[in-house]
């Protein structure tokens, strides 16, 4: 089966995260899909987060296969409407902010990027008035 944290062989045209080394070890999970919901990129944190589901071997797979209802319906809506979706979640006492945004390539809609970041227990909030 191979190492689940290593990417499968996919066309070089799809592998752009490797061109930006800061993304590889960024402490937040970054997953990128195309307009049809096919995962085209993941960083190491995302691979570790989803290792039970296949890790880097999820590249080339459909997000619809990874999400149960009602998340699947929400995902279809996001891909169709191309709108930003941001929320927080808690699992096993770990709080995260999930930021799902359309991404653009050469001026055209290219899919979605999801960033999942752990929210520290203590976080400072600043109100910046002009």
Image: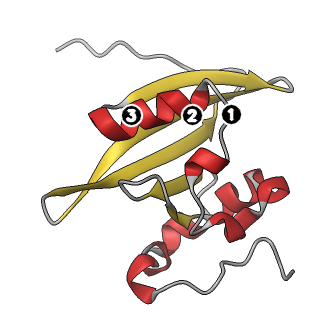
The picture places residue 54, in percent across and down from the top left corner, at: 77, 63
Up-down relation of residue 36 to residue 76 (above or below) = below
Vertical comparison of 100 with 43: above or below: above
Q: Residue at x 59, y 22 (%)?
A: 88
Residue at the extreme left: 107
> Which quarter of the picture shows residue 59?
bottom right
Residue 68's mark? 1
Q: Position of residue 127 (x, y in %)?
A: 35, 12
Viewer-nearest of discs 3 and 1:
1
113 vs 128, nearest the viewer? 113
Quadrant occupied by the C terminus: top left
Query: N-terminal of the two: label 3 or label 2?
Result: 2
Query: Which one is nearer the viewer's eye here, 108 or 66?
Result: 66
Q: Give me the C-alpha separation between circle 2 and circle 1.
A: 6 Å
Mark whose residue sits in front, 3 or 2: 2
Callout 2: helix, strand or loop? helix
Measured Cα–Cα span from mark 3 to mark 1: 15 Å
Mark 3 vs mark 2, CA separation in Å: 10 Å
Answer above or below: position of 3 versus 77. Answer: below
Residue corresponding to mark 3? 78
What is the number of callouts on the image? 3
Q: Residues within 10 Å of mark 3 (few under 14, many from 20)?
A: some
Give the residue number, with chain letter if any, for mark 2: 72
């Amino acid at each position: 089966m191979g190492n689940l944290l290593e990417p499968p062989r996919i066309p070089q045209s799809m592998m752009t995260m490797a061109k930006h080394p800061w993304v590889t070890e960024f402490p937040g999970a970054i997953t990128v899909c195309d307009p049809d919901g096919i995962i085209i990129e993941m960083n190491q944190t995302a691979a570790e987060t989803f290792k039970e589901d296949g890790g880097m071997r999820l590249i080339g797979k459909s997000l619809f296969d990874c999400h149960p209802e009602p998340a699947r319906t929400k995902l279809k809506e996001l891909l169709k409407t191309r709108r930003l979706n941001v929320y927080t979640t808690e699992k096993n006492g770990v709080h995260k902010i999930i930021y799902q945004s359309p991404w653009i390539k050469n001026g055209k809609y290219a899919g979605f990027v999801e960033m999942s970041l752990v929210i520290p227990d203590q976080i400072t909030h600043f109100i910046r008035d002009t």
